[in-house]
Amino acid sequence: MNFLPSLKPSRASAEMTGVEPQRFNRSENLDRLENERFDILIIGGGVTGAYAAMDAALRGFRVALVEKDDFASGTSSKSSKMVHGGLRYIEQGNIGLVRHSLLERQRLRRNARHLVQRLPFLFPIMEKAGVFDKRLAKAFEGLLWTYDIVGGWREGVLHQRLSKAEVLSHCPTFKEDDLIGGLMYFDARVDDARLTLNLARTAAFHGATIVNHTKALEITRDMRGKVDGAVVQAGEREIQIKAAVVIMATGVWLRDWSGIKKGADRTLEIRPAKGVHVAVPWLKIRNDCTVTIPVPGRSRRATITRWGDVSYLGTTDEDYTGDLDDVLCTREDLDFLLEGARSALKTDLSPEDVVGSIAGCRPLVAPPGGKTLEIKRNHKIDIAADGLVTVVGGKLTTSRHMAEETIDAAQKVIGKKARCQTKSAYLLGAPGYDSQAIVASGGMQAHLGERYGTEARFVSDILQSDPKLSTPIVEGLPHSEAEVVYAIRHEMAGSIDDVLSRRMRARLMARDASVRAAPRVAEILKSELGLSEQVVADQVKDFLASVAHEKLVLMGVK
């Protein structure tokens, strides 16, 4: 006889695992924007806005989100890709932010387990001219113990002291002359653009109306002067959206348009801080973790992180006053990063080795003056007298908590109350995903699993139905044409840039190869969306021009 209890399927997993892909149709959602009335309208499709949409939908609110370009096309695809507490914030004395960030890190590790993976950080200890020498190593290890105690332990492994040989096993190109050993601690990494996209799709799964390439033109107000929606433009279509409360989650773009009533005083001062990363072939570095390196004559540190077959170097942290829609890595930025790499590593890196670059602006909330590096990364939420809610600041790791507090603020405006559920809410593709089982032996399933989680089966369905779509789309990268089809059908990709820059990150990892792939992506877009020859020809032209502009600025030609 069997006396063991009968197990039931996990409710959370079962509810989010379907036999068909989540519908994420832009045309349908545009119709909903026009015909429905919403409790909450969110302007801005970065990580904070997307998480806020998911939070509001889970609380049962009728929520809509509009993004002027593509999901994560701004700051949320230009980060260091790190989900971390931040050692720097301990140095600033901001222990509370570190503790909370490390708690949120583990929530992301659980709720987005297919996208967020462990990332070791290595600090080499040098006899001289390093990030720190042996005299400071003990003091720095004390900082790492603090990090472990306030939440680093949640990862299940504490920091480690490494020998010289162990350091070189993690980064064989590190210069050996003054190397003594190293310290390693553990945080996490994520493809920030895919995380943001997944949040938007999960919000839609729970009932939210989400659209990209839809620009907010103005915030509308009723006869009493209270916010009651917005006017948006999607192509040639202008739509007036009705909503009980509007949330501005546009990040650094608040500098240029805050949505506040004419004549009203600004309560939030936005100070964009530019950060850049450049990608180089991994064989030039051969690191298996994030290596922190000194930059000669500078107080700042740089980092080198492996991602696929490239290593990316970052980051700078400087005030930025230029065009927020044209933030690029300059030759000065590039030389700064390459100088650091060459001084610490046995490598002959040159500007011509760079295969891609990204640049974006952090939305710091601070007045002018002082170094951006020293400004605390706390977020701010403001409720204007007319009911407009604004959220800005913070960092990717704490985006869930920022969203929670933002929806709490929106509830106050509309006079309703519901409990936040995102602390334990899975993202699509996460329930039932076992990274060790999927990634262990490599292959197509491992590649798809790290991007789609348990939804990988829907991409393989496309591959099985049309084997010709197994053709690689970008030379040197593992992405297939089937992933382009999936991005268009189920991830709201509507342009070449959507596909190659954010759905696949090919523009960062293989810039020139992505240019060669653009015409084929255009063909698939034409077939899937019924676009005209002229539209796809214009898309190819625009993508090639954008990449050429990026390269010219990077090389210092313009």
Image: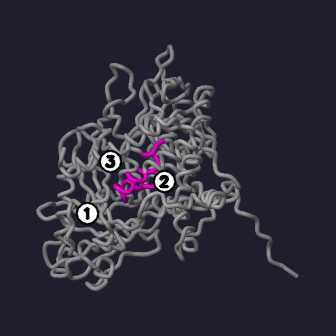
Q: Amino acid at mark 1?
A: Asp
Residue most toward the left?
A: 297
Residue type (three-letter) at the residue carrying disc 3: Val
Asked if residue 404 shows in the view, the reply is no
What residue sits right under mark 3 in the picture?
547
Q: Using a 10 Å C-alpha cutoff, classify the residue at mark 2 as few (fewer than 14 neighbours), some (14 to 19) or many (20 or more).
A: many
Q: What secondary structure characterizes most of the magenta part?
A: helix
Residue 542 sits in quarter: top left
Q: Which quarter of the figure is the N terminus placed in?
A: bottom right
Location of residue 178 in the rendering, given as x and y in whole percent from the top left corner: 16, 80
Instruction: Tell us which disc is closer to us: 2 or 3.
Output: 3
State yes or no: residue 515 in magenta.
Answer: yes
Magenta region: 495-517
Badge 2 or badge 3: first in the primary sequence: 2
Label of residue 353 in the image: 1
Asked if marks 1 and 2 touch (Cβ < 8 Å), the reply is no
Q: Relative to the observer, which residue lies in front, 107 or 45?
A: 45
Mark 3 vs 1, N-terminal side: 1
Q: CA distance from mark 2 to mark 3?
A: 24 Å
Label 1 residue SS: helix
